[in-house]
Image: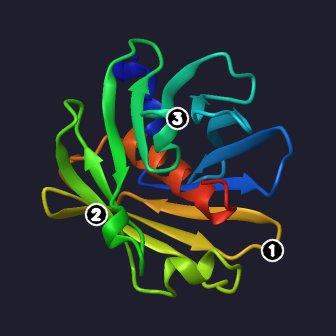
Amino acid sequence: MSADSLSHLTDERYLLQRGGWELFRQTCRIYDSKGALVLYSKQRAFRPRAVIPVYTDEGMTTGVMLIKSFHAVDRGFAYDVSDSTTGRSLGGLRRRLLRSFATQCWSVLDSNGEECGEIRETLRSPTVLRSLFIDFAPRQFIGSIGGEPVFTLTQHFSPFTTRYGIDFSMDHSGRLDRRMGIAVAIVLSKSSVHHL
C-alpha cells in the first residue's frame, strides 16, 4: 500500500468501536477525531486461525492491512500485521504469557520479527479475575518503541459495545506506523469481549 493511501490516518486520536457477541462475524469500526469512519473490519468467527482483514470502509473495497495469528496453536497470543496490497510485513505482536498474570504485556515486533517495543497494561485487577467476569474496570494500555512512549489505548465504559480511545499525540517523531497502533487496538479489544 502506498504512502498516499494512508493519508487519512494522519490524525492523532481515534475511536475504536466493536459490537458485542455476534454469532458468525465480528465487526470493528475505527473513527477519527471528527467522527468520520476511517477503517472497518469484519472477521469470521470460529476459525482455527484468526484472520482479521481491515478496509477503508464498510464496502470492503480497499484493503489496508491484514492481521493474522502466526499459527493455529498461537491463536490469541501472537499476530503478524501486513500490508494488504503488497503483503509486506508491518510488524507483529506477541503476548508475554509469564508476565501477563496480573496485567497484560505484549512485545511489539518490527518487520524482521525482532522485538522493538512493548504494550503494557496499567495496574488493575489480575487477568485471572477478569476471566471469571468479576472485573468491570476500564482498561488502559501504554505502548512504547525503544523505551519511548508512542501511544495510549483507553477503554471507555459502554454496556453494549466495546469502545477504545487511541491516542498517538505523544509520538512526536512518528516512530510507530499508525496501522500498527490500530492493529494493537483491534487485537486487544477482542479480549475485552472474551474473543481471545
Q: Nearer the viewer, mark 3 or mark 2?
A: 3
Amino acid at the residue labelled 3: Ala
Marks 2 and 1, how far apart at CA: 30 Å
Tell me residue 104's x, y (percent): 42, 69
Say what secondary structure mark 1 lies in.
loop
Q: Which mark is residue 159?
A: 1
Comes first in the chain, label 3 or label 1? 3
Question: In this view of the protein, which residue sits in the foreground, 123 or 86?
Answer: 123
Give, as a three-letter code, the residue at label 2.
Answer: Met
The answer to whether 50 appears left or right of 173 in the picture is right
Q: Report the quarter where the C terminus lies.
A: bottom right
Q: Name the image quarter holding the N terminus.
A: top left
In this rendering, position of residue 31 left or right of residue 24: left
Q: Which callout, 2 or 1, points at the residue further toward the start of the chain?
A: 1
Residue 37 tag number: none
Using a 10 Å C-alpha cutoff, classify the residue at mark 1 as few (fewer than 14 neighbours), some (14 to 19) or many (20 or more). few
Front-lying residue, 148 or 46: 46
Distance of label 3 from label 2 (alpha carbons): 35 Å
Q: Residue at label 2?
A: 170
**Would you say the residues marked 3 and 1 are in contact, meaning their CB atoms lie under 8 Å apart?**
no
For mark 2, does the 10 Å Cα neighbourhood hold few (<14), some (14 to 19), or many (20 or more) residues?
some
Task: Please name the residue that numbered disc 3 is placed on.
Answer: 72
